[in-house]
Structure formats: structure tokens, C-alpha cells
Image (spheres, rainbow, N blue to C red):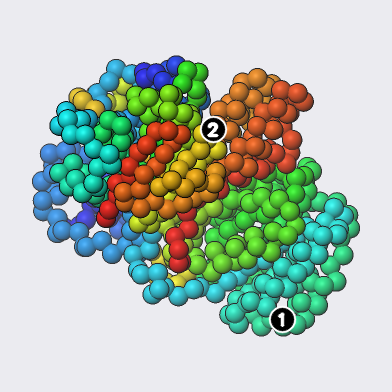
Amino acid sequence: MIMCPACQYQEVVGALFCSECGAQLHNMGSLATHNIQTNEIRSQSFEAPPPERKDLVNYQIASLQILDGGQLLTLANRNEFTVGRVSEGQTIIPDVDLTAHNAYEYGVSRLHVVLKRKEKKMMIMDLGSANGTYVDGIRLKPEQETPLSHGSIISLGKLRIQFLFQD
Amino acid sequence: MSDYYALLGIFRDATKEEIKRAYFEAAQRVHPDKNEAPGETEIFLDVQKAYDILSNPKKRAEYDLSLAPEEESSSPILQRTFYSRQSLVRLNETQLIYALLEWKPRQNKNEVISPPLNICLVLDNSTSMKGENIGMVKASAIHLIRSLRPEDILSVVTFSDRAKVLIPSSLRPDHRKMENKIRVMHPSGGTEIFQGLQEGVAQVRKNFSAERVNHVILLTDGQTYGDEKESLELAKETADFGIGISGLGIGEDWNDEFLDELASRAGSSSSYIANPQEIQKFLEEKFKQLAKVFAENVELKFNASPNTELTYIYRVQPNAAHLLSKKTIQLGMILRDKPLTLLLEFTVKSSAVIEDEVNLLVGSLSFEIPSQTLQSQPMRVRVFREVTEKASLEPPSPTLVQALANLNLFRMQETAQKEAADGKYNEASRRLQHLATHLLSHGERSMAKTVLLEAENLQGEQSFSEEGRKKIKYGTRALLLPAEKGKN
């Protein structure tokens, strides 16, 4: 048996979604935070890193780089990612959880934005977050898709993330 | 030397069970006690010999080596299978595995010609259709008549408490005359679906031909009383004859379970038309779909493997629907430009994973291709996985995960409806709240709102509202349809 992290329901091995609360159960593998030589990155102090870090970034897939800390989150294997933070008693878990990056203190909502792959582009949509989403300083209207480009700076509340994507 | 596989009518990779079953059937058919025709006894002896060799793994392996290689598969249909896991794990408990099966034409979609249509519209003409509904139906029907090609056949049957052939099926139709007949439709009386359906099927049968797409489209806004059973039996017979049935329900009052069951027996599904302005859109989509048929009467026949169970089967496209797991499943049609996609959930018992390989489903897919006069040979369908000691770390196919994520939402509302029907209002309401959260994170704001409203209704009134219930069911079902890709 496996246990649903959201509602503690005992689910049969091999289930990909909890039949009780509907939460996604399987680990998508590469969705976890990748700590890639963070010591080296941290030792360099930079404002906004140049996006050409070919040694670190696989440009086939989109990545998010947390500007305050340098960790790289890879977005792979699916076409849609919700980004937010986990809190207690929450039934839905975002695909990309920013809790470890002080998301609460920075004002990230539980379901803040969704990133969607559309043909060769990545789109971003604010899900009605409390503190809003900014892309390169411009505030997004909620529920409206906006295309992202390589190197864009996304602010979820006060948390700043750089978007890396090239095909 | 004769081909023993052909003699028994089985595939070369037939399982032990299939060989045994085929042998029993053949032996009964040609048993000397029953057959006195000259030569039958020899066939019976051949069947005996075939079984003797094929049922013995060692002899079978030797025999297989002596066979000429099978001709390169020339099936007009391509098959693909995706799995949720690379392998089953040798566990001491029950496990689940999902498979996504896909069939599409081998030919390029532009090379296939559209077969001529043979369609009957069976239109509800009861009192409740008065006003906007009938107005839109008339306008849509006239629009369809104008878009017919010379080779297409369209008949129209109207029904209330009795059925009437408004436009008979004809090979040389007069389109002007047809339009005039539609204009004089005048709704009155009750709703009795069986009579209308029977008359509609009779019209399609009149000019039935394997080279055409033969289909009945039933459009209703009400409940039928007392003739559900007859209607369902008729749908089954109709499907066996090679005619499909689709159902379109307008507004809140029609019985979606009945119409779904009716259409699913004939390989299609029902659609929900929330308001009359959409009637034309739905009818046109249906016609467009039928004009794109590549293969019809697609049937999956299979035998359950011991220790594994097919626990859920869902047709993702075309005509999304939850299908009942039976030995023979009518799957309907394969379109030129979109694959026929099935999502299957298997429950595998611990007793199955003792073997090194588990057959989850072994069977065959039969179909008819209107544009090809020759009868097509059934295709082998085999869903299987090897058993390993450790789980593989490879992530599941993204296509499958995407489909499952959406199916997950559809199943949540299914469960909530069942719980509500069983009087478990609190459970149903809580489940709907979960569903709403997931819908929100998918960006489906308005549907999430409908779902929350129904969650409240369940708490207060202890029942769904008909409108909300249908909206949720058909809305979550629509989520499963893969997004349209630009052109097509």
C-alpha cells in the first residue's frame, strides 16, 4: 500500500492519483529541487545571472532558477505545472513546491501560477494569487495567459525567479 | 504441412488458454458424431493433431521453427500502447497498472476518401420542444440538408407518442422538398423514444451498405417512460447489424444515463446541449465526425486473464465515455485524423506476479472499413508486462499521465454521484470540494464554481440540481478530450 500525502488514504500500489481526494501520488522524478553545485554558485555573488550557463542548464527543457539562492528547478515530463507552496490541511499540492525557498515569507500563494507549454512556447497564468505575479516588472492580469521568454524574471509576490528555456 | 494456427483460427502468439478454447470449439464443430459429410473426419483428425502439437510447449517450439515466417503485417490500422510502469513488481499485495491503447489508420489522412453517409435524424417532436428548441432544430436540419453531397443519404423521423417518417431514406433525394417538410414540423404529445428509434433504424437499414457510414442520431429533450428496456435491446441489435447510434440531449430533463447506455451499446456516446443555441453546433460536429470515419463497428474481444482484472475502461476519444468491461466491447469508430484511444486500469493480484510475464489483456480488434470492399482481418491486441523484483524508476508516459489526470477528475464526480445516490451526502459534498480545488488548479474557474454550488446543494437539499449534475458530468468528460491541434 502507499499513503496519499494529502489525505493519508491507503492507496493500492501503482495508483497515480488518490482515489479519495484526487491528489497526484506519483513522483515525477525530476520535479524535485535539483541542487546543482550550489556551493560554487553561492560563492559567486551576482544580481541576475547571465542566462548562458550551458554547463548547468539543459535548454531542451524549461527551468526555473531561484535568484535568491541559485537553485535550479527543472520542469520536465509534462506540459503543465502549478507553482505554489504547501501548507497544512491543503488537499492540492502544487507541482512545483517553493516552501523550501521561503515562499511563505515572500508572499507566494498556495496555488500561485500555472506554467503551460504551448507548442514551442511556455505560457504563464496567475491563478488569482494574493500578492500578484510580475513578469519583468509588469503585473499579470489573473487568469490570463502570457508568453514567457528565455531569461524573464518572474516575481511571485517578492520571490524572484528567472525563467530559462531555449529549444 | 498445414498451418495449425490457421486451422484453429488463432494468432501465432496465442496463449495456452486460447489454444485450448479454439480446440474445443473446432472439435465440437467437426466432431465425427455430428458430421457425416465426406472429409469431415479428416479435418477432425487434423484438429486433434494441431492441438496435440500446439498444447505441448516443446513440440510447439519445434513446429514454429518449421513454419514460414508470417507475412509482413499489412493491417490498415496501426496500434500503439503506453504503460504507466515499465514493469509489474513482484509484491505480496494487489497492484494497479494503467495502459493507454491507441489505434489509427496506417494511411495518410489525406489519402483516404470520405465514405458516403447514410444517416437518419430521429427528432423529438413532443410538446416540450415547442418554442426555441424546435426553431433551432428546424434551422439546423435545413442547414444540414444544404450541406449534403449528392451521394449522401439523409432521412428524418420525428417522434412524440408515436413516430412518423418525415423524410424517407432515398437514393435520389429532392433537397427542396426535404426542407419544406422540415419547416412544417409541429410539436405535440409526449416522448416515446423506442418508436422513433425503431423507425429511424428501419430507415437506415433500407439503404444500408457496408460502403457507407450508417448512423442514427437521436435528439431529445425529455425522459422516455416504460420503453427503456426495449430501446436498449434495439440499440444492441442495431450495433450488431453495423449501425451506430449517437444521442444528443437538450436542456435538463432528459435521462443522461439512459441515453449514454443506449449510444454506448452502439459504439458512440451522448452529448449535453445546455441551451438551444448550441443545437446546430453539436449536430454539425456530429456530421463532420461521421464524414471522417475511417473504420466503423470496431469491436474489442478479449478474455480476462486469471488473477488480473480490467477494473476501468474509458474511451478518451472519439466520443469520450466510460465503457463497461465486458468480453466484447463495442468501440465505435476510428476517424481519419484522430486515433481511437482507450485508457485501461488493471488490478493485478499478488498471485499473478509469480510468473515472469503477465498478460493483462489478450484479444483481438475487429473492424469494418467502408472505403475498402475487402473484409479486414481482425488485429491482435496484447497488453502485457514483465515482472521484476524492483520498481523501475522511469517516469510514466506523459501522454498517459495527462489522460489519467483528467480521468481522475471525471471519476471523482462519478463517485460523488454514486455517493449522493446512496444517501452519503456529506461524503459526496466533500468529494466535490476536492474536485473544485483540482479544477481551479487546472484553470477551470467556471466549472469549479458549478461544482462548489452543487457541493452546497448536497449539504442543504440533499440532492444535485439536474442542470449542475449534467454540467459537471459532461464538463469533466470534455476535459479528457485532447486539445485540438491548430489545423486539422
Give the image location of residue B357, x and y in percent. Answer: 23, 33
Residue located beneath label 2 in the image = A130
Closest to the observer, B460 or B305: B460
- Residue A93 visible in rendering: no
Disc 1 secondary structure class: helix
Chain under label 1?
Answer: B
Residue at image position (82%, 72%) is B183
> Looking at this view, is B449 or A141 the one in front?
A141
Identify which residue is drawn at 66% across, 83% down. B172
Residue B96 lies, with reference to residue B65, above or below; the image says above
- Which residue does the image show at 42% across and 53% down from the upper left? A147
- Left or right of residue B339, residue B146 in this image: right
Q: x%, y% of residue A47? A: 27, 39
Q: Is residue B258 left or right of residue B269?
A: right
Which residue is at a point 35% across and 48% down the rendered structure image?
A152
Give SS at disc 2.
Answer: loop
Residue at label 1? B175
Q: Pointer 2 indicates a residue of which chain?
A: A
Amino acid tagged 2: Ala
Mark 1 burial class by Cα count in 10 Å: few <14, some 14-19, many 20+: some
The CA span between labels 2 and 1 is 60 Å
Tell me the quarter of the image containing the N terminus of chain B: bottom left
Q: Which mark is residue B91?
A: none
Q: Report if residue B153 is visible in the image.
A: yes
Q: Amino acid at mark 1?
A: His
**Residue B71 located left or right of residue B343:** left
Whole-percent x and y of residue B328? 47, 45
